[in-house]
Image (spheres, rainbow, N blue to C red):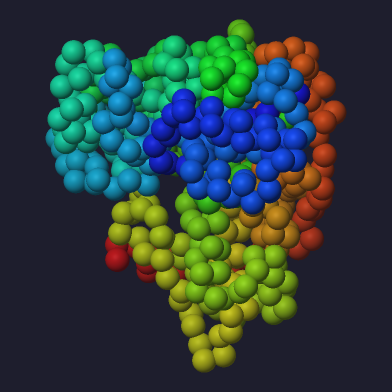
Amino acid sequence: MHILIDYIDTCNLPVSGVVQVKYQRAFQKLERGSVPQLCIFVLFLQINAFLFVVWFCFLAAGLHMRQIAGLGISTQRATFITWHKRTGKPFHNFISWQDLRSAELVNSWNKSLLLKVIHVIFTVLHFLTGNDQYLAPSFLTFSTQQTSMKLSWVFKNIHEAKEAAKKNNCCFGTVDTWLLYRLTKGSVYATDYSNASATGVFEPFTKCWNPTLCNLLSIPMSIYPSVKDTSFNFGSADSEIFGAPIPIMAVVADQQSAMFGECCFHPGDVKLTMGTGGFWNVNTGGHLFASRSGLYPLIGWKIGEEVVYLTEGCMSDIGTAIKWAQDINLFTNVDETAKMARSIVDSQGVCFVPGFQVSVNDPYLCASFMGLKPSTTRNHLVRAILESIAFRNKQLYDIIVKKVRIPLQTIRADGGVSNNSFVMQMTSDLINKKIEKPANADMSSLGAAFLAGLASGFWTDKEQLKKLRRIEAVFEPRKDSEEYRPAMDTWLQATKRSLHW
């Protein structure tokens, strides 16, 4: 059996041996039925959330720790922490990809003469060589979402981290690295290729941490962990934590993990994740593609000699916008939204422009409703929100078709918003492609379990994994995409009016 922990919280993770032993005994009693079930909620309030998830999974499966052959970890990408190498003490809380404290630094760099010079140099190199390795630096623009800028901010503003780095005593880690470090009591300090490539500090072309960028931003090269295969024996969780040593057989970033869970193993396979944000990922096989149009290259996974690359495009405010609409009582249950949207012929010209999070292209983009009328109802507002998701899916898909020089094959969707049949059908209509939705929308968990299973020998090849896929629904085009053109043109106009607010 295999278990995956999909941990995306951004709090510190204290691991107390006393607390662990105390609550391991409590869980053993719970397994024997001698502790009331209410104990679970007491434990949740008192112990580490990560460990609670693991123990709860064991209980739900009716398994003992010693029955587990391997553990896989899928985590949110780019969120990171730094800590003292000798003491293990963090210098700060986790800094998430949404953190804005580096905004002033970002603006300064983007206006600098040095960055313009870099653009010219790499533009010439790309022109002379045709090598895509030089394309991304030729239009490099920094943003607050990038790990590189937030790391630079750390070493400019957190004195303890700066001083420790001077003595080679500073460690950097994304969530996966921190979990590995704590689960193994500090004996394993590593990450995998998928998580490393998502930081923007790791060069996917050369498969190493980028010394040029680090020198440019005054980030010490000594802080980075070693990079291992995605499906790999990272060592075992200390037996004091779970009561038995559990091999950690896979570490993978959430979007790449979802790609693997969807069995998008072949060039041209496409995954669409619609969760808090939205991500389009294309398997590009052994080839890396860089683009000026908002697409960026990633390492999907590395297993032995096999390295699979992805091209990714992202959009913010997918699930975020729906949750906000629920918070202001536009609807009670998210399951109502598809029915509400279908209860009317159209949005009556109402457009929703998402902009709750800082845009890479325009940090001053504002969220807005436009086209409101006295006759506008909740149904129109909800439909406008859902339509905005489908319209942005169409935008990203068109960029991918134009820029990725690989014929696109199967499109598979996952994430909580993929359960919304209105969004799924409208997206299928707009892109004129069939979209498969799996029975389980939480693919990042399944992907890490697959990778852990391969590393431990539970499964021998990917063909076995394909047989485990379960498709719940298939959405095929029902309307000509041209029927949506007036509504999409109106939405694009509304988006332009929300820029530079």
Single out the residue that lies furthest toward the top. 305
Left or right of residue 231: residue 111:
left
Which residue is the extreme one toward the bottom? 374
**Which quarter of the image is occupied by the C terminus?**
bottom left
Quadrant housing residue 405: top right
- The relative height of residue 448 versus residue 393 in the rendered view (above or below) is above
Q: Is residue 430 left or right of residue 44?
A: right
Numbered circles on residues, count: 0
Can residue 77 be seen by looking at this rendering? yes
- Residue at image position (34%, 18%) is 224
Q: Is residue 113 left or right of residue 316?
A: left
Q: Which residue corresponds to the image point at 65% horizontal and 76% vertical from the top-left?
A: 346
Q: Position of residue 296 (x, y in %)?
A: 46, 33
Q: Residue furthest right?
A: 467
- Image coordinates of residue 96 in percent, x first then y, are 38, 41
Q: Residue at x 37, y 69 (%)?
A: 497
Q: Nearest the camera: 284 or 38?
A: 38
In depth, the one of 228 and 412 nearer the eye is: 228
Give the vertical position of 186 relative to 273 (above or below). above
Q: Who is closer to the viewer here, 45 or 120? A: 45
- Picture quarter containing residue 165? top left
Quadrant for the N terminus in the image = top right
Place of residue 168 in the rendered image (x, y in percent of width and height, measured from the top left): 23, 13
Q: Quadrant of residue 451?
A: top right
The answer to whether 353 is drawn above or below residue 200 in the figure is below
Residue shown at the point (19%, 41%) measured from the top left:
105
Q: Is residue 139 visible?
A: no
Which residue is farthest front? Answer: 34
Give the image location of residue 112, x and y in percent.
16, 37
